[in-house]
Image (cartoon, helix red, strand yellow):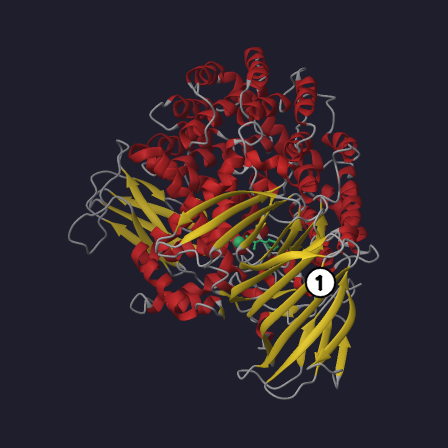
Amino acid sequence: MQNDQPQTIQRADYQPLSWTVDTVDLHFALDAGATVVTNRMRCVRNPDAAPGPIRLWGEAMERLELTVDGAQPVALRETGALLEIDAAGESVMVEVRTRVDPRANTTLSGLYLSSGGFFTQCEAEGFRRITWFPDRPDVMARYTVTLEADREACPVLLSNGNLVGQGELPNGRHYAKWEDPFPKPSYLFALVAARLVALERKVRTLSGREVLLQVWVEEGNLDRCEHAMEALVNSMRWDEETFGLELDLDRFMIVAVADFNMGAMENKGLNIFNTKFVLAKPDTATDVDYENVESVVAHEYFHNWTGNRVTCRDWFQLTLKEGLTVFRDQQFSADMLARAAGPEGAASARAVKRIDDVRVLRAAQFPEDGGPMAHPIRPDSYQEINNFYTATVYEKGAEVIRMLHTLLGQEGFRNGMDLYFSYFDGQAVTCDDFVEVMSEANNGFDLDQFMRWYSQAGTPRVKASGTWNAADGCYALTLSQHTPATPGQPDKLPLVIPVAVGLIGPDGRDLPLRLEGETQAGATTRVLKLTEEAQVFRFIGLAAEPVPSLLRGFSAPVILELDEDDARLAFRMAHDADPFNRWDAAQRYAERVVLAMAGGASAGLPQAFVNAFRALLADTRLDPAFRAQALALPAEPYLLERMSPADPGALRTALIAVMGALGRELAGDWLRVVDGMQVSGPYRYHPGDAGKRALVNLALRYLCAGGQPSGLALAEARFAAATNMTERFGALAALVQSSSPARGAALLAFHARYRNDALVLDKWFALQAGAWRWEEGGEPALDRVRVLLSDPAFSLANPNKVYALLGTYFRANPGEFHLADGSGYAFWADQVIALDARNPQVAARMARALENWRHYAPALQARIRPQLERVLASPGLSPDVAEIVGKALQ
Ligand code: PHE
Ligand code: ZN
């Protein structure tokens, strides 16, 4: 197809359309093999654009008829997916009838089938697979939708907005008519026609309106909706209280579907969710699942304002809605956790959430920023927009919003948001609009240099060094910044980097901070603004040499380079008043120890490291959730990124040795933790309980890794006696990640119990795909993955299954994927090619597992390159995969 001549779209080429649409009347005669879509749209001339034809996009459908004001168009040109129609006057009625085949649609974009029901997915460019349309986010129209389907197969007919009519039709069919009062871009259109049931709740909004909330699922899942409903109600409250934003519809629906490419979708009034982020009950969902459901429900709900009421002018602006909405959902989750933890535990609960978010950023976004797909949060070009729903646009985008929040303060940020909605409600705008309004609402706060965060790719390095002058009690902190070159961006300019700083005294307590020129000391943490290539900050009035604690709370998405010896890391692990940095000190120490071992240092663990770990573990004043975070090793993909060249085999050997040694040397402490952490009463999703369960599960992991017979027995017992999924799965994972002979039986028992539960089976697939080899002659994960590929419960057609089995193997099990003989890579190429034929978006995600191949040792590179080339040369390759593999090979 396009693999020779990939089409690149440039941000700079944006032009408004000559014609937009103001009303759309859609009629769907739903049929699995042949759905007829009738679209009557009023096209209106755009006064702000140069004159030109009406432009409509369409693909993967059959055009039955097209008329303009009831007649054949005078001039119509068709080039690929683009249709151009000449029209006169200020407005015309275009009617187009198309036939689509939902059953044949394996891409899960456009109109498709899942367990016999009809679902749509239109972001980013799925609407053009349903009807011809100016399918761009800057075309906002009012929609009326009539759905017609078989009553028996599809008793429930849903679309955006309000239900305005319904009734019976001949031949066992029925219809429903929906009207969405708010103009919206086509990517927010949705319909659902399926056999579903709903959990309902009525609530009152801030202004006293009663609204109907529904969570629609398959009948057997009705007992798993309560948590999602609770999350929705909490999200509504939070957005009212925090931003004064209220639900604008009389009805808000969430629908769960088992076949879905992404997590969820914020269609206006009709959010469609991957079942994974809706369904939860204690027997099938872990604490982490509960947490994810809550944050994804919130994320999609928050889009109603940040995304839907104010949307993106073009897809380059994606972070305008995504970065902002991720930031909002992160704040929401932190507030919910803090509230549940109570005043005593609130700070720690917030830190634990921050740690979670930074872990994701480091494991997923940092490698992206260091590879061939590196792009600014607002990219300048793309070949396939679906490839740009990235950790950079989402997670780094959220970090950029967080820095704005830090610089402007809570109130200044809120004022900016208020002004944003007052200016832009109902419009499609740009990131510049957002940042300008933030400045305007804050007395013209200068954000010109800050805008570079939107245009420069790559993770900045901030180097810090301090000099102590005992004679005048001055500590001079030099901070310098450098952003490495990325594809297409050889040189970078200095950014505005907020660096939150504390100074720790010899007794471990924070010192009041006083900068040169200030009359008195103030707070113990303050935010320095690094704007130049290098700056010196002089702290005065100090009695003894301090230990700096930098980038507290991870105040900017950068890599901090600071020379700290082991003793200093251990000191900060024990004393840093900032819990995030306390965790980070432990991560840095662990990284150092693991990478030294992977690089061939002696096999034993440094005693000082073991002692520092033990001290954290035994510090019962620390909240268990925090201890679980602090004692978990850094993520393997992050460690690989920090190695050069990356040697997955050596890293794995080192991780096995470190896990095992920590399990053995701290065995008594781990066992005490398990004993002392009993959670009583029936399962409830509560951060306090979840923290205890997380720490116990971590203890089991270490004990089993260390091959401790008492630990293995404990894991087996807990697996058998567990009363909820968090405990059951935690014990199972500990057994599987060990050389325990009980592994196989436990996996079988788990399978037997959950053989009919798709979401739990995903866990079962993922666990095996991610298994390490704990003993010589152990089964390679690749062999197991091959066997599981033909398991009756596995299907390449279901994205969750693909992510669980193949995604876990390719991305989360580097030690088993990067096999010296290259067999993992050949398998990868086979799977990417097979997947691409049915679902390019999912295939492209899998393809990304090898994009950073140039970081690996030469022997591995030599094995990877031919496989990348084989994929690129594969006939009929999608533009999605072609972009990923093409850029990797460049
Ligand atoms: N916009 C969705 C979200 O962030 C993600 C998504 C993108 C879903 C594209 C489907 C397709 O919540
Ligand atoms: Zn989103």
Q: Residues within 10 Å of mark 1 (few under 14, many from 20)?
A: many
**Could you tell me if residue 208 is visible in this image?**
yes
In the rendering, at what x and y percent does residue 9 appear?
65, 69
Which residue appears farthest toward the bottom when viewing the image?
A: 89
Q: Is residue 381 above or below residue 106?
A: below
Which quadrant holds the N terminus? Answer: bottom right
- Residue 65 location, quadrant: bottom right
Looking at the picture, tell me which residue is in the foreground, 652 or 438: 438
CB at disc 1 and ligand 1 closer than 8 Å: no
- The residue that disc 1 covers is 129
Looking at the picture, tell me which residue is in the foreground, 318 or 637: 318
**Residue at (73%, 46%) from the top-left corner?**
116
In the rendering, at what x and y percent does residue 787 appear?
78, 31
Looking at the picture, tell me which residue is in the foreground, 116 or 536: 116
Looking at the picture, tell me which residue is in the foreground, 544 or 865: 865
Q: Secondary structure at mark 1?
A: helix
**Could you tell me if residue 447 is visible in this image?**
no
Q: Is residue 545 above or below residue 476?
A: above
**Residue at (51%, 25%) from the top-left corner?**
698
Identify which amino acid the numbered label 1 is placed on.
Arg
**Residue at (76%, 32%) from the top-left corner?**
788
Left or right of residue 125, residue 554 in this image: left
**Residue at (78%, 36%) from the top-left corner?**
821
Which residue appears farthest toward the left when viewing the image?
A: 519
Q: Is residue 718 above or below residue 883?
A: above
- Residue 517 location, quadrant: bottom left
In the rendering, at what x and y percent does residue 667 appear?
49, 15
- Within the displayed image, which quadrant is ligand 1 positioned in? bottom right
